[in-house]
Image: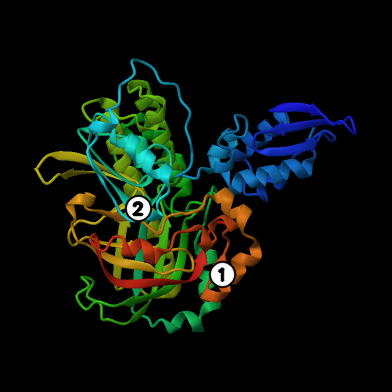
């Protein structure tokens, strides 16, 4: 943060790395109800933090400017990760795939393999993947614990391991190779109801989504503690135990960013689909979200520990690992699996509520997850830990859902078990444009026109999620025909996202 004097007016101006020059105004006053309208729950930690930071560092600024700033932080926290003052607020609104954690490394630095020593890895859809994502994968492959890797067709740059990166390592787990939103997943429920049901009941389905879903950092009122909170990990691991209240508050809710709950039409195209379904159209419900603040806190905690125990060169610092022979490594492994099960339980609660609203039970369900690590075997029989950050399992016969954008179809798939890809496939279309660039490139009018052309109703959502910010899902699918077989499609019709 720097101060300047305006040459023409003499007013003091405030400048930060993420903001324009703003004239200082009268003393700032912020009330809880002001913040509540912006998504800062009254009495919450993030509301208190916002008030403290603003009163300490922005107390002479115009109230309208400060409230606009706080609203922008809540909507696009990743834009403020580089601001040493504002990022403490931004991290309370975590965008799981885009938060950078700055922590001190201690101890002797572990050297990386020379670029000529790394194992070859397969890149799918290479011409549609940005160079920085490929460079990140190259760095990851230089870790001394790496045995194999692959880069999926939806890949784009992240922190450490790129989104769409698959990495097999020996007897270790990389918290940031898993990612912030541990166990993020797709969950598809298919109902024995005709596709026309949406057209005839559009308003009611819209209301069902509004009344039965919650997004972002808002607490979700519940009457009974979910069974997942009875797990022994919450009693036996101190670092997990202290997160139990957070897990309870956000149970059954969805994250912000690209997370969604939507009604749409499933078209089953293959008779041998493994779901026991006829080849016809069905009403369906699809959700995408992860382990919320609970999983993100686990990621932050154990990334910090990993960086203390495993000091790497600057370009690889986010790939610090924990050996599974250490207490911290086994703690993280148990916590990661708990977070994955928690994410699944959240989806099941969302689908339960909406099934009740529909007055029907699903006849089939497909669920698959990413941002996780699995113990698997390489073709030579060696056991490895396979990290899939923004990639999904595609072992032989494994079912999954690969979504497009809010206007593009998703695909119900069955894995082919391709060893070169480490039995993996893409987890979606993948971004071709950052959130910041999308907001600078498109307008609300562009969004409305894209939705109109596709006949999609959007509840919430922002310009950063405009369909044009994503890769062409058809190109992504064409690049991985060796990895999955398509069994059917899902076309979104009513999409619910964070505001």
Residue 450 is marked as 1
Rendering coords of residue 155 (x, y %): 38, 50
Task: Determine which residue is flagged by label 2.
Answer: 126
| Cα–Cα span, label 1 and label 2 | 27 Å
Asked which colour scheme the image uses, the reply is rainbow
Q: Is residue 92 left or right of residue 426?
A: right
Rendering coords of residue 134 (x, y %): 37, 43
Q: Is residue 274 left or right of residue 496?
A: left
Residue sitting nearer the eye, 454 or 141? 141
Rendering coords of residue 429 (x, y %): 40, 59
Up/down of 22 relative to 459, above or below:
above
Up/down of 354 relative to 199, above or below:
above
Name which quarter of the figure residue 450 lies in.
bottom right
Up/down of 427 relative to 304, above or below:
below
Q: Secondary structure under badge 1? A: helix
Rendering coords of residue 276 (x, y %): 22, 75
Q: Residues within 10 Å of mark 2 (few under 14, many from 20)?
A: some
Q: Residue furthest top?
A: 107
Q: Secondary structure under badge 2? A: helix
Badge count: 2
Q: Residues within 10 Å of mark 1 (few under 14, many from 20)?
A: some
Q: Is residue 301 left or right of residue 81?
A: left
Residue at left offset 48%, top offset 55%: 258
Residue sitting nearer the eye, 402 or 136? 136
């Amino acid at each position: 943060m720097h101060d300047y004097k305006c040459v023409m007016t003499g007013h003091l101006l405030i400048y930060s790395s993420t903001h324009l020059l703003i004239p200082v105004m009268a003393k700032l006053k912020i009330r809880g109800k002001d913040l509540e309208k912006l998504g800062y729950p009254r009495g919450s930690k993030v509301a208190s933090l916002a008030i403290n930071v603003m009163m300490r560092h922005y107390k002479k600024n115009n109230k309208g400017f400060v409230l606009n700033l706080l609203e922008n932080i809540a909507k696009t926290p990743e834009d403020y990760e580089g601001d040493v003052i504002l990022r403490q607020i931004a991290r309370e609104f975590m965008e799981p795939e885009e938060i950078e954690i700055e922590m001190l490394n201690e101890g002797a630095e572990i050297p990386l393999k020379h670029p000529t020593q790394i194992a070859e890895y397969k890149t799918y859809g290479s011409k549609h993947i940005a160079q920085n994502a490929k460079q990140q994968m190259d760095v990851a492959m230089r870790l001394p614990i790496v045995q194999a890797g692959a880069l999926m067709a939806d890949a784009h740059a992240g922190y450490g391991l790129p989104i769409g990166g698959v990495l097999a390592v020996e007897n270790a787990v990389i918290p940031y190779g898993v990612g912030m939103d541990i166990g993020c997943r797709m969950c598809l429920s298919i109902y024995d109801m005709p596709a026309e049901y949406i057209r005839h009941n559009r308003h009611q389905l819209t209301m069902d989504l509004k009344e039965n879903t919650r997004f972002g950092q808002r607490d979700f009122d519940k009457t009974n503690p979910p069974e997942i909170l009875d797990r022994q990990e919450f009693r036996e691991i101190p670092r997990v135990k202290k997160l139990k209240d957070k897990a309870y508050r956000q149970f059954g809710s969805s994250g912000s960013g690209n997370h969604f709950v939507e009604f749409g039409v499933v078209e089953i195209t293959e008779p041998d689909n493994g779901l026991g379904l006829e080849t016809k159209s069905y009403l369906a419900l699809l959700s995408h979200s992860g382990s919320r603040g609970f999983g993100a806190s686990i990621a932050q905690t154990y990334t910090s520990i990993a960086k203390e125990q495993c000091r790497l060169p600057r370009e690889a610092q986010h790939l610090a690992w924990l050996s599974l022979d250490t207490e911290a490594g086994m703690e993280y492994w148990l916590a990661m699996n708990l977070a994955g099960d928690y994410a699944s339980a959240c989806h099941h609660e969302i689908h339960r509520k909406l099934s009740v609203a529909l007055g029907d039970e699903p006849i089939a369900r497909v669920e698959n997850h990413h941002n996780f690590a699995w113990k698997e075997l390489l073709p030579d029989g060696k056991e490895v830990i396979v990290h899939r950050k923004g990639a999904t399992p595609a072992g032989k016969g494994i079912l999954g859902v690969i979504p497009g954008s809010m206007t593009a179809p998703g695909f119900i798939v069955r894995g082919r078990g391709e060893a070169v890809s480490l039995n993996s496939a893409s987890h979606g279309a993948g971004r071709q444009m950052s959130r910041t660039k999308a907001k600078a490139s498109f307008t609300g009018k562009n969004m409305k026109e894209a939705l109109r052309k596709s006949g999609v109703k959007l509840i919430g959502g922002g310009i950063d999620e405009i369909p044009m910010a994503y890769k062409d899902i058809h190109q992504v699918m064409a690049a991985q025909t060796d990895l999955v077989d398509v069994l059917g499609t899902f076309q979104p019709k009513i999409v619910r996202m964070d505001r």
